[in-house]
Amino acid sequence: MRVRFDPPEPRRVPPGEYQVWDQALALLNRDLAVTLPQLEPLQLLALPSHDADEPESVYIAMADGEWHGNCLDPNSQDSLATALASVADAAQETVMELSWQVWPLCPEHGLGMHPMEDAQERLFWWCAGERLRRGPAHVHAAVGALDAVSAPLSL
């Protein structure tokens, strides 16, 4: 006898349910609005666990509810810095895979930037592109602040 398995339905997470992830996602959505204004804001999407003893999995999804990649680390809710790192990684993976483009791009090099944490647990968009007379890589802007910079920052 075959048992039919119906996968659990994802649900849109209402604002305030995961406050630290909401704050982190608001910062990422600022960067998305500046760099890809044609896309609607990203959202949190939850998928119930198959095991009643396990927490639901929360993903970063496009406005239409599609997502790609791993869920957010449940332990990343301990601080805004940790949440921002987890949300930035997940958002970047979802946006790049579902829009078929690199995001965000360094305006100086046209290369994809990656989130990087400094010693004070601040998260920046980092570019691996070479810079004349100033070293091989650079920080472009804080995550959530792509709208506030007009020129790259040096490390």
Image: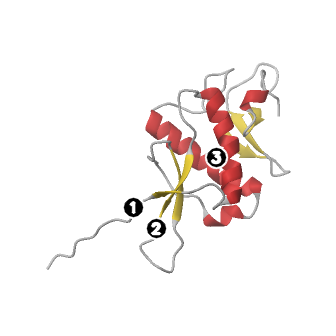
Q: Nearer the viewer, residue 43 or 82?
A: 43
Q: Which residue is mark 2?
A: 48
Which three-letter amino acid code belongs to the residue tagged 3?
A: Ala
Q: Earlier in the sequence, mark 2 or mark 3?
A: 2
Asked if residue 28 can be seen in this view, the reply is yes
Q: Residues within 10 Å of mark 2 (few under 14, many from 20)?
A: some
Q: Nearer the viewer, residue 43 or 57?
A: 43
Tally of numbered discs: 3
Q: Please state which of residues 131 and 17 is positioned toward the viewer in this rendering.
A: 17
Give above or below for 126 relative to 85: above
Q: How far, Cα to Cα, is label 2 from label 3?
A: 22 Å
The residue singled out by tag 3 in the image is: 88
Coordinates of residue 93 in the picture (x, y in percent): 53, 44
Residue at screen point 60% across, 62% down: 73
Q: For the residue marked with disc 1, what is the amino acid? A: Glu
Give the labeled residue for mark 1: 9
Q: CA distance from mark 2 to mark 1?
A: 7 Å
Q: Residues within 10 Å of mark 1 (few under 14, many from 20)?
A: few
Pointers 2 and 1 in contact (C-beta within 8 Å): yes
Residue 92 drawn above or below residue 35: below
Percent coordinates x, y for residue 136 in the rendering: 74, 29
